[in-house]
Amino acid sequence: MKDIQDKVKNFIKKYDLESSRETRFIDLVSEVGELGKEILKGNDYGKKDYCNTENLEAELGDVLFSLICVANGLNIDLKKALDEVLKKYEDRFSKKGNISSGR
């Protein structure tokens, strides 16, 4: 995961794409919206069975890139964050039989 974060960090530096944390977060939200739109296209807004669209992988890549940019801007180690959340979910599942934070 560190290699991926470094790869994105180097890309941002190479192309002078630095921006604020807030801008990166807004970009992430925007990209998630575009991914959602692509998923809706995959079932024609609920009118047919779902099928991946031609642009789905690229939209998911945009979300991943934006998320990594947010993490880098906040100095978050994504491997550590993922390990911690998996442990949290594992604990919840062993106690409640699901990973929900609710009941």
Image (cartoon, rainbow, N blue to C red):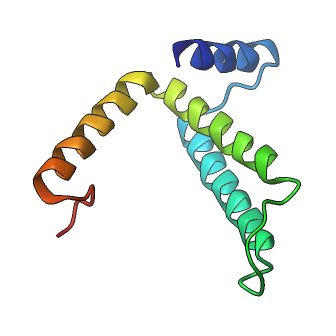
The quadrant in which the C terminus is found is: bottom left
In the image, 10 versus 99, the foreground residue is: 99
Q: Position of residue 31 (x, y in %)?
A: 69, 52
Judge left or right: residue 101 versus residue 10: left
Is 22 drawn above or below residue 101 in the view shown? above
The image shows a total of numbered marks equal to 0
Q: Residue at x 72, y 65 (%)?
A: 39
Q: Nearer the viewer, residue 67 or 75?
A: 67
Q: Which of these two is toward me, 31 or 44? A: 44
- Say above or below: 43 vs 38: below
Q: Residue at x 67, y 15 (%)?
A: 7
- The image quarter containing residue 32 is bottom right
Q: Position of residue 55 (x, y in %)?
A: 85, 53
Question: As drawn, which residue projects farthest toward the right?
Answer: 54
Residue shown at 76%/75% (left/top)?
43
Q: Position of residue 57 (x, y in %)?
A: 77, 46
Residue that protrudes farthest toward the bottom in the picture: 47
Does residue 102 sit above or below 87 in this rendering? below
Tell which of 87 and 68 is nearer to you: 87
Task: Name the residue located 70 percent from the left edge and 12 percent from the top edge.
Answer: 10
- In this rendering, would 78 be left or right of 13? left
Residue 33: x, y in percent? 67, 61
Q: Is residue 71 above or below residue 98?
A: above
